[in-house]
């Protein structure tokens, strides 16, 4: 039989080699066309010696392709003449004026372009590779298959709602977002502090001795003047809600001086002061304190939206990680089932080989399959560990929480597939419920506020200032004759000449009490009014600020458009993803069922002796792969449902979550103290590779 097969292969090679050579020779020896184009003739039917249409009488195979007949009224097109190997020009005609195709032949008769012979293959390039020894992994013992850092038994069941509740109460990133939310509220209070009343008390004392520099700055004995001044100033000042400033103060001073020219010693000065300044143009509608308060209020809204967005992302991450853990555990079960089946097949092959039914290579094939599934089991276990750690990072805030050591197993059944929502309804739901909308609206409020403030700064400064001071005075009056000037005048004037000087009023005699009484009685008032007008020439800064605020307005408008576009894109992708996930589940389920039926049939044929070990092992691998595809499709469907809920903005309502108290327990549980251990030198474990 092998001899006849070799003869057949040689005969086939001879026929095809003759065909290509004959075709090339026929093309090279084609006669030159006439000078005038002639109508194309249809090829004559081949006179086959064998099968019809397989070859001509000369033994050259003919193509089954027949060129279409030219349409009625069309003229054949004569192509440019080409040169044959013999030097004779060659012209090819195409029906109906089709684009010409030029064929060039080489002397050997092989076509370079458009022919039947392919070009010769490019010779491989093999650069030299240096030999490297001793880099194989020195692993001989079977590693521990247990999960690291968790108790292997018992398994701890975890419901999806419990996982969500734990994440919202303990998630560290959400706790930071909630902390920023509270900080934003404190910033509102801090901004309102601009309207706090500022109380000021300034007690003072001074002692001075002035040299005698004139006859009027000396004592009665002609010595230097000593003055002791003690007093206090108390007052309040603040801002009004209309952009003005106000102040009120009380001044009390006691002055004791031995100057010979003072009429009172000591004397007491008091004053009640009131002042207010109100802007009439710039700063009347809005000023810097009011701007900061409103911006702080908007920032609080932004922080609240950020916290909600972080909570939404946390929910999505928790649910995705939860379903990944479901898939990871089920994948371990699939790989272990494949390992058991492969091991059973290997044991069966060993028994059959012992009886001489199968070849020893079948045992090697089965053992290889066992090793492949064992590797898959280890990989699946590693994936369980990775997903568990990811889920615990989302659920826990304290590194010493006992849940870190639990071997978590999901217990919530697969969610029902929701009814597919209309696209417009999903977009409208996102616009109404998503926290990103509140963020963009806050940006709009900020830009409007900045624009209003910038326009207000273009107004001129026109401030009206009003002031009132009620002064008080009292003291211990001195005899006018103690004044050297009056004493000198009394010595040279006639007797009784100085008696005409009026005496001070009696209400000026006294101490602080009398001085304050005079101030309250408004005996010595002072009134003042002032109007300040100021405007910068050019207004370059103000105009630039207005232009910047207007550009920010345009940016917010663009952001709004981008947000609606993103909502539409996410809604389209979410609905399409839900459909695709359902399609994939149905297809993967059918493929898995078909693979299982094929495996059962292959096993029956193997038992009957009409199949091989390789085919049985291949069917087992196909079943495991199809089960994995179905598992992944189901996981993707669960995640598609989560994504649909996220896009609609209904995650909180669907899970019954109060968004106003998210993440509060995390910071309260951790406290302000650091949980990091004290710094201590610890030697790192050494990893060495020894030569093999």
Image (cartoon, rainbow, N blue to C red):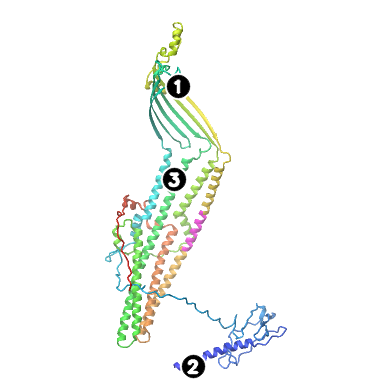
Query: Is the residue 186 above or below the residue 96 in the image?
Result: above
Q: Earlier in the sequence, mark 2 or mark 3?
A: 2
- Where in the figure is residue 488, as x and y percent of width and height? 44, 11
Q: Which residues are magenta?
A: 559-573
Image point 44% across, 24% down: which residue?
A: 470
Query: Is the residue 52 above or below the residue 263 in the image?
Result: below
- Where in the figure is residue 619, as x and y percent of width and height? 38, 79
Q: CA distance from mark 2 to mark 3?
A: 94 Å
- Where in the figure is residue 658, as x and y percent of width and height? 37, 53
Disc 3 vs disc 1: which is toward the camera?
1
Residue that protrudes farthest toward the top in the picture: 495
Which mark, residue 524? 1
Asked whether the viewer can see residue 287, the reply is: yes
Decide whether the magenta segment is chiefly helix, strand or loop: helix
Q: Which residue is mark 2?
A: 7
- Indicate the quadrant where residue 361 lies: bottom left
Q: Which residue is mark 3?
A: 296
Q: Is residue 362 left or right of residue 562?
A: left
Per the image, label 1 sits on a secondary structure element best described as strand
């Amino acid at each position: 039989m092998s001899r006849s097969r070799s003869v057949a292969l040689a005969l086939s090679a001879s026929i095809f080699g003759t065909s290509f050579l004959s075709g090339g020779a026929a093309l090279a020896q084609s006669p030159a066309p006439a000078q005038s184009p002639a109508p194309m003739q249809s090829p004559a039917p081949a006179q086959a010696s064998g099968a019809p249409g397989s070859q001509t009488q000369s033994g050259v195979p003919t193509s089954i392709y027949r060129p279409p007949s030219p349409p009625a009224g069309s003229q054949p097109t004569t192509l440019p003449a080409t040169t044959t190997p013999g030097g004779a020009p060659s012209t090819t005609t195409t029906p109906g004026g089709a684009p010409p195709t030029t064929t060039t032949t080489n002397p050997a008769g092989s076509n370079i372009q458009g022919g039947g012979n392919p070009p010769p293959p490019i010779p491989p390039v093999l650069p030299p590779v240096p030999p490297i020894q001793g880099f194989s992994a020195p692993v001989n013992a079977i590693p521990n298959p247990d999960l690291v850092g968790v108790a292997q038994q018992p398994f701890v069941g975890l419901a999806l709602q419990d996982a969500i509740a734990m994440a919202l109460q303990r998630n560290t990133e959400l706790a930071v977002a909630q902390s920023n939310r509270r900080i934003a509220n404190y910033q509102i209070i801090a901004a309102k502090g601009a309207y706090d009343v500022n109380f000021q008390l300034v007690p003072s004392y001074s002692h001075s001795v002035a040299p005698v520099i004139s006859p009027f700055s000396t004592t009665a004995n002609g010595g230097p003047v000593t003055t002791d001044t003690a007093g206090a100033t108390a007052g309040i000042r603040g801002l009004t809600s209309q952009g003005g400033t106000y102040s009120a103060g009380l001044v009390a001073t006691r002055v004791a001086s031995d100057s010979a020219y003072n009429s009172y010693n000591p004397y007491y000065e008091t004053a009640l002061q009131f002042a207010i300044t109100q802007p009439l143009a710039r700063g009347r509608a809005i000023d810097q304190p009011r701007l900061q308060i409103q911006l702080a209020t908007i920032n609080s809204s932004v922080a609240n939206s950020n916290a909600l967005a972080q909570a939404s992302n946390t929910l999505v991450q928790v649910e995705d990680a939860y379903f990944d853990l479901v898939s990871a555990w089920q994948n371990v079960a699939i790989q272990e089932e494949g390992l058991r089946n492969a091991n059973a097949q290997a044991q069966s092959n060993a028994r059959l080989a012992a009886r001489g039914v199968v070849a020893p290579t079948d045992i090697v094939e089965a053992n290889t399959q066992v090793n492949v599934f064992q590797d898959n089991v280890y990989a699946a276990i590693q994936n369980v560990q990775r997903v568990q750690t990811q889920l615990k990072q989302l659920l826990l805030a304290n590194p010493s929480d006992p849940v870190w050591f639990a071997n978590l197993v999901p217990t919530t059944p697969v969610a029902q597939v929701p009814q597919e929502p209309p696209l417009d309804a999903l977009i409208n739901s996102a616009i109404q419920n998503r926290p990103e909308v509140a963020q963009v609206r806050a940006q709009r409020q900020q830009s409007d506020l900045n624009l209003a403030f910038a326009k207000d700064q273009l107004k001129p400064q026109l401030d009206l200032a009003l002031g009132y001071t009620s002064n008080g005075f009292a003291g211990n009056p001195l005899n006018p004759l103690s004044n050297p000037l009056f004493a000198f005048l009394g010595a040279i004037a006639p007797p009784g000449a100085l008696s005409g000087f009026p005496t001070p009023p009696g209400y000026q005699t006294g101490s602080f009490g009398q001085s304050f009484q005079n101030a309250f009685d408004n005996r010595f008032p002072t009134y003042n009014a002032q109007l300040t007008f100021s405007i910068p020439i050019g207004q370059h800064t103000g105009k630039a600020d207005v232009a910047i605020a207007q550009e920010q307005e345009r940016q917010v408008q663009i952001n709004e458009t981008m947000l609606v576009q993103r909502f539409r894109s996410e809604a389209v992708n979410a609905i399409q993803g839900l459909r695709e996930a359902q399609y994939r589940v149905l297809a993967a389920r059918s493929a898995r069922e078909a693979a299982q039926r094929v495996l059962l049939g292959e096993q029956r044929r193997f038992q009957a002796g009409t199949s091989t070990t390789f085919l049985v092992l291949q069917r087992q691998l196909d079943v495991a792969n199809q089960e994995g595809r179905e598992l992944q499709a189901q996981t993707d469907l669960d995640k598609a449902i989560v994504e649909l809920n996220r896009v609609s903005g209904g995650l909180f309502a669907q899970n019954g979550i109060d968004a106003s108290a998210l993440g509060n327990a995390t910071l309260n549980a951790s406290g302000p103290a650091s949980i990091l251990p004290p710094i201590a030198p610890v030697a790192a474990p050494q990893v060495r590779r020894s030569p093999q």
